Amino acid sequence: MIEFIVLITGVAVFLYTLLAGADFGAGILQILPIGIDRKEKTSLIGMAMGPVWEANHIWLILALVISFNAFPQIFWFVSEWYHFPLGALAIGIIFRGASFTFLHYDPIKDGSQKVYHWFFGLSSIWCTFWIGLIVGSMMLGDFSLTDTGIFERYFKHWINPFSFSMGIFATVLMMFNASLFLTAEAKTQRMAWKKLTIKIFALLVFSGLLTHGVLLINAPERWKLFFLNPISITLIALSFLLLFAQLYTIEKNIKNLSRLVAGIQLICILGAGFVPLYPNFVLTKDGVAISFIEASAEPRVLELLCYALVFGLLFILPAYYFLMKIFKIKSED
């Protein structure tokens, strides 16, 4: 049962990272001077991301609900130790959602549109950075569950070079995913979008190497844990090779294959960070692990949750697909 629940949670996290990540990345690209007319850029982003925007947070909510019910100790740990980063992320999501709504649905079009435009882009950067920082801090595990000081418990474990470098990497990764979506959808100035994607590709490789280097210098034992694991090495190598396959799909304008490759790449990246720890969720600096097995709820709760997930997904997945198709048709009209 635990394996099934962890799998569904992982799928939810993957879908949120892929779809909401591309959405966040599009918000960042919207404010960057990339040599494309602002109105055309905004229109393309709305067409490509509109279907995703309408329902991508369902996957985040699903992951949170599963964690709360199936793994209460893990839910407590994340809520307690990452109280401030999660609070910052929540503030960014609120500002981003509000600015998007006013930007597209405000009946009065005046100078305030520029304010909404910038709030949307800056909050997108803000959110992606905090997501990467939280992931980086968990990978590093620079804390002890026995810490009682305010600074050690709430701040020290995420204020470090590796967490910040992961924040940068996550931001670039989501920009890259967004540029793939937008390049596939672009009908005019497609060459400009292709050039932008290639530039972000180079930046992604650089930021990935930077993240590796920072972890190797600051925490060599953690680097060995994540990057000398045979499965992780395979996934990282496959993700890197798929970058070149992605460039081919962009050049040939193979939309569906491009999206499939992007999804596989993201699975590889997430897997490289998850596989070395499983069945643990996080490993602290003093060797204490929070395990999915030990942190799980009572067997009866897990059993009922499995039934609910199977029943719910039978309804959610077809409805989600139908919703995306409707908004996709609407955005192309």
Image (tube, rainbow, N blue to C red):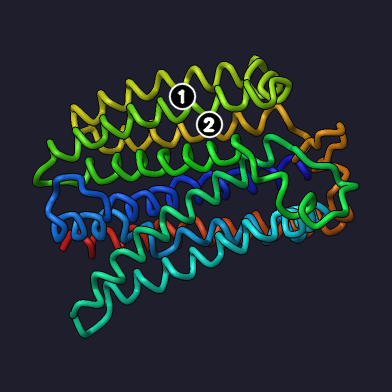
* The label number, if any, that marks residue 269 in the structure image: 2
Q: Earlier in the sequence, mark 2 or mark 1?
A: 1
Task: Please report contact status of discs 2 and 1: CB closer than 8 Å, yes or no.
Answer: yes
**Residue ranking furthest to the left:** 188
The amino acid type found where label 2 is placed reads: Ile
Distance between the Cα atoms at labels 2 and 1? 7 Å
- Above or below residue 174? Residue 241 is above
Q: Is residue 306 visible?
A: no
At which x and y percent is residue 213?
55, 22
Q: Which residue is located at x 69 percent, y 55 percent?
A: 82
Q: Secondary structure at mark 2?
A: helix
The amino acid type found where label 1 is placed reads: Ser
At which x and y percent is residue 200?
31, 34
Quadrant holding the N terminus = top right
The residue tagged 1 is 239
**Residue ranking furthest to the bottom:** 108
> How many neighbours does mark 2 have within 10 angstroms: few (below 14), some (14-19), or many (20 or more)?
some
At which x and y percent is residue 112?
25, 77
